Amino acid sequence: MNYIKYFGITLLIIVIDQVVKMVVHYQMDFGTVGQIKVFGDWFKLHYTTNPGMAFGMQLGSEYGKLILTSFRLIAMFGIGYYLYLLISKSAHPGYIFCISLILGGAIGNLIDSVFYGAWLGNAPYDAPSPWFHGQVIDMFYIDIWEGFIPDWIPIFGGGYTALWPIFNIADASIFVGVAIILIFQKRFFDEEKKAQEEDDVQKQFIENK
C-alpha cells in the first residue's frame, strides 16, 4: 500500500501539472497580452515557455537541449528507483513524501521537453527535431521587483530584469520537496540512522544466536 500511496502522490502532481499547462496553452494568450493579474502586480498568471533549465539557463550547443532532456530522463529513472528503495526500507514518511514531490515535478517538466515540441509545436525554430526539444510551459509569475540593474553589479548588471522567475506546478513541487528536506533534514536522517542502527543490532543478535 505504501508504494501505491507515494507513487500515487507522484502521479497526482504529474496530472495536476499537465492539466494546468494544457489549460494555459489553450485558454490564455502568450506573453504580456494574455497576462492575468491575480493579486495586483505582485502575483500574475503569465503564459511563457522555457527552452532550458531553471531561470532560462541553456546548454550552449546545437545538441544542448537534447543533452538536457536526456539527463532529465536518466534522472527520472534514478529518482524513481531511489523512491522505491526508500519505501522498501521504510524510511521516514516525510522524507519519502518529499522525494515523491520531486519525482512528480521532474516527470512533469520532462513530459514538456520530450513531447511538447511535437504535440504543441513549441520547439525552437532551429531545433533539429521537435521531439526532445519541447519548451516547458510556465505560468505563475510572482513579481517582487522589476527594474534596471546597474552596470557595476557583476554578472547581472547592465540590463532590465525581474527579481523572481516564472514557474509552474512541477517547479513548485520540486522546490517544496527540496525545501522541506533542508528544513527537516536532521529529523529525517537522524531517525533513518537510528533505524539502521537498530537493524544492525538485530542482525548481529541473530548471527550471534
Image: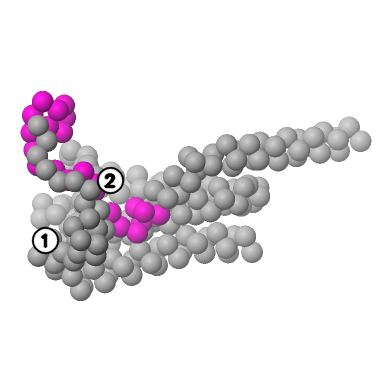
Which of the 4 image quarters holds residue 193? top right
Name the residue type under label 1: Thr
Instruction: Give the camera-side residue of 119 and 189.
Output: 189
Asked if residue 113 shows in the view, the reply is no
Can you identify the residue that label 1 sits on? 32
Image coordinates for residue 203, horizontal then vertical, percent: 80, 37
Give the x, y percent position of residue 29: 14, 68
Q: Amino acid at mark 2?
A: Ala
For image coordinates 18% across by 70% down, the residue present is 28
Answer above or below: position of 64 versus 87.
above
Which is more foreground, mark 2 or mark 1? 1
Looking at the image, which is closer to me, 70 or 55? 55
Residue in the picture at 42% in, 50% down: 176
In this rendering, the answer to whether 52 lies above or below 28 is above
Q: Which one is nearer the viewer's eye here, 57 or 206? A: 57
Secondary structure beneath dot 1 equals helix
Dot 2 crowding, Cα within 10 Å, few <14, some 14–19, many 20+: few
